[in-house]
Image (cartoon, rainbow, N blue to C red):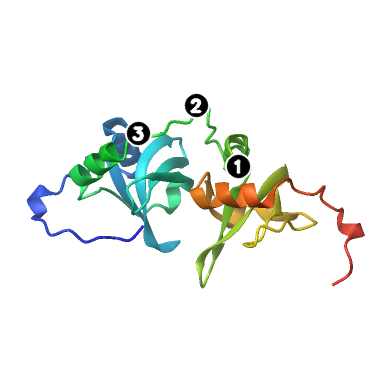
Amino acid sequence: MVNIKHHHHEGNVVQFRGRGTRAQLREALEQHAPVQIARERVSPGLVHGYVIGVSSEFCLIAEVSEAMRFDGFVALAIGDVSAVEQDPGRKFVERALELNEQKVPQLADFKLDNWQTIAESAARETPLISLNMLDDELGEVSYVGRLTGAEPGALILQEVDPNATWYPDTGAYDFADIGSIGFATEYMLLLARIAGAPPVPMPPEAMPAS
């Protein structure tokens, strides 16, 4: 979402009072307040939406698009969050969502224990998930596909490319390199519909040599 600048007096900006990032995220959750979340070490952009889940190390955000509609979810590591602020246009956001007949979505029994439980919970909600991997130059690089399992220290994903073509094999994505996990955006839902059912993944030994 584009970061729209609002002209306002500093005294009109409502700051979360919680001491520490996790406390601020919990406050945003309890207040049902739209937020802007910065992760300066990961990405220059902001995450916009509503906090709908917080654990000791992770949070779950229902993202809000420029069109003022809910568009998917993203799970973030709290340790990567550098700032949590109430959206300065809160009244507009709330009114616009109301006009669009949008209600804050809730996901029951979503597990935020670690990247594996997050990915497994996301995969139960939707056919495709996005593993957003940390990159020194690009910030995050997204790999979209079907979660097929996990191994010690990594998630296993069967990817689908931007033309909705399935890869014939799977790949391992290390927990240590995951920046965030996204799912259920309009783009991914359409991609899943166009791609259709994935083929049975070929074992590595069956793949042609590169």
Q: Amino acid at mark 2?
A: Ala
Residue denoted by label 2: 108
Mark 3 residue crowding within 10 angstroms, few (<14) / some (14–19) / many (20+): few
**Contact? badges 2 and 1 (CB < 8 Å):** no
* Residue toward you, 110 or 2: 2
Q: Secondary structure at mark 1?
A: helix
User: Which mark is nearer the camera, 2 or 3?
Assistant: 3
Marks 3/1: CA–CA distance: 24 Å
Residue denoted by label 1: 119
Residue 11 x %, y %:
8, 50
Image point (44%, 41%), residue name: 59
Q: Amino acid at mark 3?
A: Lys
* Residue toward you, 22 or 145: 145
Residue 80 x %, y %:
44, 53
Image point (11%, 56%), residue name: 8
Q: Amino acid at mark 1?
A: Ala
